[in-house]
Image: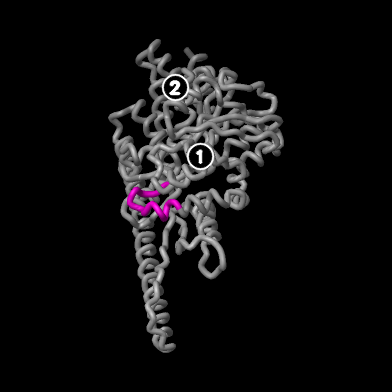
């Protein structure tokens, strides 16, 4: 019994509380209790485990990390669901989540007010310009009837000012303005002018399009799917959502250490694998793949739950053998980890992944070209999400046609505006990861060019 208690203390000291290779503190203490129900050291050990998880949960709350706190509290509930401390921590998590939701709502309200202010200012400028022209005509005595073409202004919802979605929206605007004939002897006399302000991203953009505040927007393919199919209460249900084209891929990367011997998903068995911290996109994708492959946590020698900032260091320090990361191509993170410790990216293109892509229209395969990173000796094929360019069926066909035409007629220029656009393929752009129907204006252009 004393030796068993020593093992329990070793697990506790190493923070192997409820998951770990070779046993856990909770399992060990409960084994002692099974042998000796009255053993006080086992009771005290479980109490200390509870206290450690409670401490971690409080620290996470102090740092504003509700997802991590909730993960720790779930362990507390397993240990002692009746504890008042569990209820107190859950109340703290709820307060933190409510505060975050209120902050997001405040940001969205500020964005709505800014958009409305810009609209009013734009209309005032247009009115002043019309009045100036009319006055000039009158002073010259020119009473001849003239056709006055009003410029059409379109707005595109993007993302954060440092992100690729912001580049997508502003690149589309550049192509639209490049095509315009106003002030030039040749070009398209479409009269369209466009702006692409920074926003909160996919969910916000779709919501604003549904309200008529944006004409177009950039949206991740899974939110695009959920909005059109009304399958999530986290995004506006919008049956008028229409696809225009897909842009760059955002595939899932399985990153492995140089000498790990891992070449495929099945090789992860018996290895030390980071599955992502609870609530993260990396964790969600790892759990999806684990279910699809029939992989359990017990199949790994060690399953860690690191934040993304810590995974690359853990891999290069030899503490883990592999981790997952959803990112665009190319990625500065991937460039850094492959240079720093010769990490590799493996293929995810087997029968399981093919079935996931076939069953979920928001997924698509993507190729990381040979030479993209220091250790990419050949093409790597994986799968994941895509950025898509969307609109509403209420937006006029002519406007969507001109925007689509501006991008595709100047696709070489568009590709040069960001490294993620380098491999854009027109035939793939009109079908990959698009869930909502194509807008009629886009269809008209694609049929003209023989793409459909």
* Residue 47 picture location, percent across and down: 39, 28
Residue 395 numbered mark, or none: none
- Seen at 44% across and 51% down, the residue is 401
Residue closest to the eye, 390 or 175: 175
Residue closest to the eye, 412 or 141: 141
- Seen at 36% across and 53% down, the residue is 395
Q: Tell which tag, 2 or 1, sits nearer the viewer.
A: 1
- Residues packed near mark 2 inside 10 Å, few (<14), some (14 to 19) or many (20 plus): few
Count the numbered circles shown: 2
Residue closest to the eye, 107 or 27: 107
- Seen at 42% across and 63% down, the residue is 153
Question: Outermost residue toward the top?
Answer: 35
* Residue 371 picture location, percent across and down: 70, 36
Residue 413 counted in the magenta span: no
Distance from disc 2 to disc 1, alpha carbons, whole Å, reads 37 Å
Q: Which residue lies under the disc numbered 1?
A: 451
Quarter where residue 87 is shown: top left
Q: Which residue lies under the disc numbered 2?
A: 291
Residue 319 seen anywhere in this rendered image of the structure = no
Quarter where residue 38 is shown: top left
Q: Are marks 2 and 1 in contact (CB under 8 Å)?
A: no
State left or right for residue 181 relative to residue 88: right
Per the image, label 2 sits on a secondary structure element best described as: helix
* Residue 256 picture location, percent across and down: 63, 28
Marked residue nearer the N-terminal end (2 or 1): 2
The span shown in magenta is 390-401
Residue 43 seen anywhere in this rendered image of the structure = yes
């Amino acid at each position: 019994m004393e030796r068993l208690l020593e093992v329990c203390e070793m697990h506790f000291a190493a923070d192997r509380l409820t998951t770990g290779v070779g046993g856990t503190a909770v399992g060990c203490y409960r084994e002692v209790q099974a042998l000796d129900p009255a053993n006080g050291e086992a009771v005290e050990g479980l109490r200390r485990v509870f206290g450690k998880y409670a401490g971690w949960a409080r620290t996470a709350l102090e740092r504003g990390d509700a997802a991590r706190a909730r993960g720790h509290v779930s362990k507390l509930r397993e240990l002692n669901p009746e504890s008042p401390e569990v209820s107190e921590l859950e109340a703290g998590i709820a307060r933190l989540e409510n505060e975050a939701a209120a902050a997001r709502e405040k940001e969205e309200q500020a964005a709505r007010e800014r958009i409305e202010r810009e609209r009013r200012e734009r209309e005032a400028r247009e009115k002043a310009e019309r009045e100036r022209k009319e006055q000039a005509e009158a002073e010259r005595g020119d009473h001849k009837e003239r056709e006055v073409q009003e410029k059409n202004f379109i707005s595109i919802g993007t993302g954060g000012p440092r992100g690729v979605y912001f580049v997508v929206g502003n690149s589309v605007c550049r192509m639209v303005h490049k095509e315009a004939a106003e002030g030039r002897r040749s070009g398209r006399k479409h009269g369209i002018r466009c702006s692409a302000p920074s926003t909160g991203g996919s969910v916000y953009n779709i919501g604003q399009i549904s309200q008529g505040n944006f004409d177009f927007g950039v949206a991740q393919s899974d939110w695009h799917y959920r909005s059109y199919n009304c399958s999530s209460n986290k995004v506006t249900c919008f049956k008028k959502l229409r696809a225009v084209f897909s842009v760059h891929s955002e595939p899932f990367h399985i990153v492995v250490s140089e000498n790990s011997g891992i070449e495929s998903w099945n090789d992860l068995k018996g290895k030390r694998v980071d599955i992502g911290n609870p609530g993260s996109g990396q964790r969600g994708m790892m759990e999806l793949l684990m279910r699809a492959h029939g992989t359990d946590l017990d199949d790994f020698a060690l399953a860690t739950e690191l934040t993304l900032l810590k995974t690359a260091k853990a891999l290069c320090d030899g503490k883990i053998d592999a981790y997952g990361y959803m990112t665009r191509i190319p990625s500065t993170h991937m460039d850094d980890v492959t240079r720093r410790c010769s990490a590799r990216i493996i293929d995810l293109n087997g029968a399981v992944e093919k079935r996931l892509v076939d069953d979920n229209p928001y997924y698509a395969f993507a190729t990381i070209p040979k030479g993209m990173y220091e250790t990419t000796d050949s093409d790597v094929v994986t799968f994941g999400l895509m950025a898509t360019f969307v609109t509403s069926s209420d937006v006029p066909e002519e406007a969507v046609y001109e925007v689509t035409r501006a991008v595709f007629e100047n696709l070489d220029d568009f590709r040069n505006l960001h490294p993620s656009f380098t491999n854009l393929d027109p035939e793939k752009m009109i079908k990959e990861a698009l869930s909502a129907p194509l807008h009629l204006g886009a269809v008209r252009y694609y049929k003209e060019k023989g793409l459909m």
